[in-house]
Structure formats: structure tokens, C-alpha cells
Image (tube, rainbow, N blue to C red):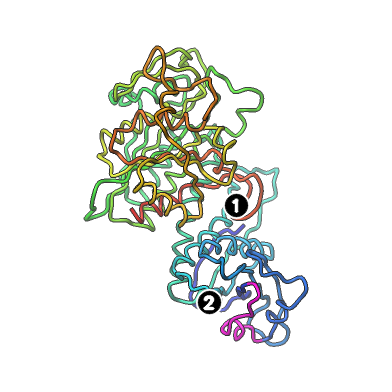
Amino acid sequence: MFESVRIATRGQAGVLVLGVFKDQPLDTSSARLDASGAAAAAVKRPEFSADLGAVTEAFPEGRSAYARVLVVGLGERKSFEPGCLRLAAAAMGRRLAGVKATSAHLRLETSLLPAKPDLSEAGVAFGEGLGLISWTCDEFKGKGTPEPKRTKLTLRVEPGAFADGVDRGLSLADGANIARTLSQTPPNIATPAYIARQAKAIARLNKLRCTIVEGEALRRERLVGHINVGKASENGPCMIRLEYRPAGARGKPLVIIGKTMTYDTGGLSLKVNNGMVGMKRDKDGGCAVLGAMHAIASTVKPRRPVVALLACAENSISDEAYRPDDILTYRNGVTVEVTNTDAEGRLVLADALCWACEKEDPAAVIDLATLTGGVVTALGSTYCGMFCEDDGFRGKVEAAAKASGERVWRLPMHQEYREMMKSPIADILNSNPNRKAHPIQGAAFLSYFVEPGVPWCHLDIAGVHVAERNAGLYTEGPTGWGARLLAHLADSF
């Protein structure tokens, strides 16, 4: 969309952007800025709509400080909440990009006063929406594609809480966009070693501690999931640890874990037909965690320490590959019978969960993973599947989800589901051939690697990590889902 977006609190702009609620006139301040009356005339046109995200253009005549006016619909005032502004910002951004605008004067805060939102929260939502719609990834285009011409947008916003919020929202969107670019990177480039280099770069930029556990260190730490899942590939596995620890840090760390399978062939339980297409995105949980750590360290800056663990491997095929019927013994003593090598993500996540509980002394643990197709069947692309039996921690995750606009839906966890994962030979199976409660099976498996008493949340993002079309906040492709949720969670935890 845009090459970049910059906030300014002064200066002239070519486009004026105003907001209006359904069945409401332009507010007094907006009407004063609309000196030519172009916006007032536009809202009376038959095609005008104040539905949320609808945009109507007007062109002032005579003497005007602006060449163009955009009137953005804010929907019904009674149902308005700050998160609505993400869609309003996306609609505005699409239109400004479409007309190659380089500057715009945004005056929404006066329009919002009748709805009485928190202006800072409203600004954050608007900034997130504009930042998300501005993401592009052209670095893999070659000479066969004309070089795109994108403009730099300067957005003038009046000083105050709303402007500060917009700036913060743009920064939070940057974290999600880092995740999206990593997701888009193909597997011949984005190997585990490449992800480790990106983590080191983010650590240097944000003064984070970064440790890469690989090679012999994996064996010393008994990270058997990484070792076995990754041993068929020439691109060796690793676990990446990032730590944010501010001066005067208080309390135990929040630990965030991401499944980071840089490619998934299914292993010896090979995916069929075109089932491998898109498996470069099996790393999107880890991509979101990296984006979140950037946002946490650069923008949120909580007082509590945050530790990120990326369980990183490539599931490939060779005579070294692990097999169905293999039994793995984890560092916490749990033994796993492998029944399906295409249920590999939970095997590397189990390592990270063991590590988090044993070595980090966590206040709470949350993991993100593109874990099951079953959650897509259950919830589609509208909600992420959430598993969390700790009421207090679940409330914090739900609040962070509301703040980021990334929806979560609680799915059940019961001992009967854990019993489904029992093996007649080892302690548990990595995959039960019985497809009942398929998304819950994945969470039930992971629960065996979380110590009792540790607040834990598992988010299955398989249905929400990719947008299938250009609409709303996203262009077709990765969404960076979870990066902003984790940043909001760290801010409030």
C-alpha cells in the first residue's frame, strides 16, 4: 500500500479526512474545517453511506486548503467501540493509497466525542488498522514484474491522546508486519538458521538477550522433539530463546512460545496431493512471537520480564527421518509413541513447554501454533481456538484479544480428552487415529508437558494466520495473527 506512514502534528496536507456516524451531522469542528461545504454536500448525496468503513469523496471548489475530502463512515454510534476504527483506518488507507495521496489531515477525534471512547485506545486501534493495511512484501519479485510505485504518507493528527495512540498503534502493527514478512519468506531462504539470524537481528535492535540452542546443545538439554523432527533435514533444528528484562524488572517472566516449523512435508507420513503447498507458513506461531518481542521491547516496555521460545525445525524426509512406531522420552520423563510424523509441531512444542516450566520459573506460559486442521473445521477463519483452564490467566488473554481485535474462542479441556492420547505402549500417542475432538487432541497432548500449577494457554491459530482475500485489515496472505495480542498481553500482565 504505502512505502511508509509518518505521523506529524503540524503542516499542510492535501486530503482532509473526517468521520461521521449514521444519522448524525458533521460535528462542529469538522464543519469548520469543511469551509467549502464539500463534505456537508457529500453526506447529502444519494450514494452516501455512514456504514462502518464506507468512504465518500468530495472535491472542494473555490478557495480551500484541501484538494480532496474523505468522509469515513463510523457506523451506529450506540454500537461503536474503539476497535471499530481498525476497519475505518483500513478503508481510509486503501482509498488514500488508491489516489496516490502523500499527505492527509486526520480529524476523527472530534467526531468520536459523542460516543465518548478512550481517545488513546481509539488512536491505537486506528494506528493498528492503518499500519496493517500498509504492509507489503515485494522482495521476492524479479525482473518479470514492473517495480511498484508506492508513496510515503504523512498523516497530520492534532496533538493529544488520540495522536499518541495512533503512533503507538502504528508501532504495534510494525511487530505484526515483521511476522507477516517472515511468514511470506519461502522455505529455501527461511531455514531454522535464517530464523535464528532474524531473531539475533531483532535482539540487537531492541537490546534483548538471544540464545540459540542447537547441535550438541540440543542433546545436552534433551530436546528430543527438535532432534527427531529435524534430523531428516540438512537444515538443522534449533530452539531460539529471547529475553526482555528491563532495568528494575519485577516478578516472574511471562513466557511466550511459538511453533516454528520452517517447512512441513509431513515427514514419512507424507502429505498428499497439494497438501504441502503453503507449509512455509507452519512457522507462523514463531513469526508472531518474534514480531511480538519487537513490539514489546520497542513500544510496550512492560516492567515484567518476557521470555520467548521458538521451537524451530524443518520436517523433511530422508533415511535419517523419525518414523511412526518410534518412542521418544522427553526431559520431563513423559514417553511418546509416534503414530504420525505429520503431527510434528506438538513434538517440538513439548520441548519448549518443558523448558519453560523447568528453567524459566514462569508467571504464566502461552503458546501459539498452527497446530490442527480440526480447529479450522470448528471455527473457520473467524476465531482462534483457545485452551486455558486457569480463570485468571484466561481473563487476561481474552482482554488482550479484545484490545488487539484478534478473536479467541474457548474450547474445552477435560480429563477424558487427555485419556484419548494414552498409548498402549508408551505414556501417550502424538496422534490418535480417532479424529474425534481433533483440535482438542493437540491441546490435550501438550498438557502433558506443562507442570501442574503453571497458568498455561494454548492458541491454535491454524484458521486465522492467513487471509484468503484482500478485505478488511489485510491483503491476501499472512496476517501476523497474535503478535499484537501478545504485546497487549505483556502490557497488561
Badge 2 marks a residue whose secondary structure is helix
Q: Which mark is residue 114?
A: 2
* Start-end of magenta stretch: 22-35
Residue 237 in sight from this viewpoint:
no
- Residue with the mark numbered 1: 474
Nearer the observer, disc 2 or disc 1? 2
Mark 2 and mark 1: span between their CA atoms?
29 Å
Residue 358 quadrant: top left
Q: Is residue 54 left or right of residue 452?
A: right
Determine whether 240 is above or below 172 in the image. above
Please name the residue shown 51% across and 55% down the image. Answer: 405
Q: Is residue 80 visible?
A: yes
Amino acid of disc 1: Tyr
For this orientation, the residue located farthest to the right is 46
Task: Tell me residue 131's x, y (percent).
Answer: 53, 58
Viewer-closest of 350 and 270: 350
Question: Which residue: 70% across, 43% down?
Answer: 144
Q: Give the residue type at disc 2.
A: Pro
Any magenta on residue 123?
no
Query: Mark 1: which secondary structure?
Result: loop
